[in-house]
Amino acid sequence: MADCEGCVYFRRRCYRQCQFKSLLQMGVKRDVICNLKNMYCLPYVERTLRCIASFEDKSSFVHSFDEDVHNRMIHVLTGAVGAELVLKEKLADREKKCEDLQRQIQETKAAITEKRDANIKRKEAIQLAKDTVEELNRTMQTLNITQG
């Protein structure tokens, strides 16, 4: 019954028996449904919303009664559902971009570590070469002194 709280309509009727349940499951917010209920007579809204909810593709739904009011209701509902879908898509895109950026950061860190390790090895090799040259120079000086 916690889902039934929030507006007079949902407190009066059990959520499980509510004819708007399928719309709620589609993601239409409770306040949008309640605003529609307040704008139009309740039986009309319930009948229309039941019809709308029974269609997978809301844009293909066509009904003959009170076309202007019906079109406005469809616009409000599909707009609410569409806006939520767009936001969900944007969120998914941002999450994907975030994952891509995190992966790139990890790759960059790995590349930096690899280059740093390569630089350390190169410096060690240079130092070893310098030490070898100094050793050779001392050996040459020692040989020159003993031969000279």
Image (cartoon, rainbow, N blue to C red):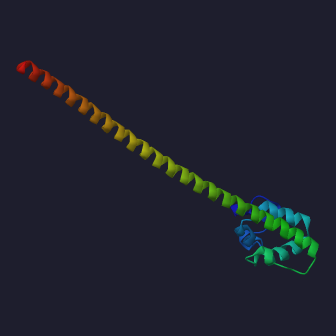
Residue 18 figure quarter: bottom right
User: Relative to 42, is 5 on the left or the right?
Assistant: left
Residue 128 in picture, x, y percent from top left: 24, 33
Q: Is residue 132 above or below residue 76?
A: above
Residue 38 in picture, x, y percent from top left: 89, 63
Q: Nearer the viewer, residue 23 or 64?
A: 64
Residue at (50% x, 47% y) in the render: 105
Q: Nearer the viewer, residue 49 or 81?
A: 81
User: What quarter of the picture does the C terminus occupy?
Assistant: top left
Res 12 seen here = no
User: Relative to 132, is 76 on the left or the right?
Assistant: right
Tally of numbered tags: 0
Residue 26 in picture, x, y percent from top left: 71, 69
Q: Is residue 13 above or below residue 90?
A: below
Residue 52 figure quarter: bottom right
Q: Nearer the viewer, residue 21 or 129?
A: 129
Q: Nearer the viewer, residue 40 or 75?
A: 75
Name the residue furthest bottom: 64
Name the residue furthest front: 148
Residue 134 in picture, x, y percent from top left: 20, 25
Residue at (77% x, 62% y) in the render: 30
Res 91 seen here = yes
User: What quarter of the picture does the N terminus occupy?
Assistant: bottom right
Residue at (75% x, 76% y) in the render: 57
Q: Is residue 42 above or below residue 29?
A: below
Residue at (92% x, 76% y) in the render: 67
